[in-house]
Amino acid sequence: KAWYQRAHRLAEAVGDAASTARVQRQLGILAHRRGDLTAAGDHLRRAREGFEALGEAMELGRVLNAQGQVEAALRRQSAAGAAFREALAWSHRAPNDAPLEIAIRLNIAELALETDRLLAAEEDLRRAEEVAIAGNLPGLLVGIYTLMGKLRGLQHDETGFVFFEQAIELCRTLGRPQAEQGRVYHEYGSFRGRLGQGTEARAYLEQARDLFEALGRTIEVARVTEEIEQLSA
């Protein structure tokens, strides 16, 4: 936070509006990760105002994607969905930004899973997979396959393990970040838990917790720990 604030002061001092807005977006993302959703919303609002004045389509897509995640965290599903769809529209105006489109579609799909719209979720996930393969972006398939596995779990389809195993293998071969690996293990553990496979579920959840603890991701640690305790109960 201190480094971002320093960058913000410097950007404002030299009148760099684009950099000022980018730092506001990063401050918003950081505040969200720290659980301060009010501050996150304030930073993202300022970032959006800055990029709207500059007409930056790609950056507006990124800000609105982040805003959608904040709205989802606040359980405001309608507002989150609107932000994600607007983000997707802006991303289509930005040339060749496949990673941004995929990131937005993953968030749209995850929101659809939370609201039990499984067919809609699968549609966005399949589209994201097509974009990732066409753009030769194998690293982005990790998140796609993780959510495909989660989708199959919600459908009580045991074949979902195939997607999780693919995601884990991609993490290993591509050296994906620990936070991403942690999320795969978390969702895989939840998947095993839904199928009544308590021992396997605990093993994957504990791996996820270890990774999140090493990164200091306290919110994720709390979520995984709660699931482990529920298994014990």
Image (cartoon, rainbow, N blue to C red):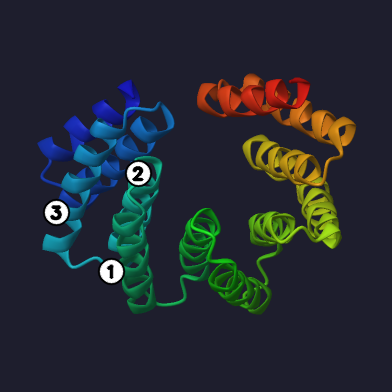
Identify which amino acid the numbered label 1 is placed on. Ala
Question: If the image is split into quadrants, where does the N terminus sit?
Answer: top left
Q: Residue 70, which numbered label?
A: 2
Instruction: Determine whether label 3 and label 1 are within 8 Å by CB.
Output: no
Counting residues from the N terminus, which is met first, the one under dot 2 or under dot 1?
Answer: 1
The location of residue 156, given as percent across then percent down, is 76, 58
Q: Amino acid at mark 2?
A: Val
Relative image position of residue 166 (x, y in whole percent): 82, 57
* Mark closer to the observer (2, 1): 2
Q: Residue at x 33, y 78 (%)?
A: 93
State which quadrant residue 6 falls in: top left
Query: Which residue is located at x 83 percent, y 50 percent?
Result: 173
Q: Which residue is mark 1?
A: 57
Relative horizontal placement of residue 187, taking residue 197 as reference (left or right) = left
Q: Nearer the viewer, residue 59 or 3?
A: 59
Element under label 1? Answer: helix
Depth check: 164 or 4 in front?
Answer: 164
Residue at mark 3 = 49
* Mark 3 vs mark 1, CA separation in Å: 12 Å
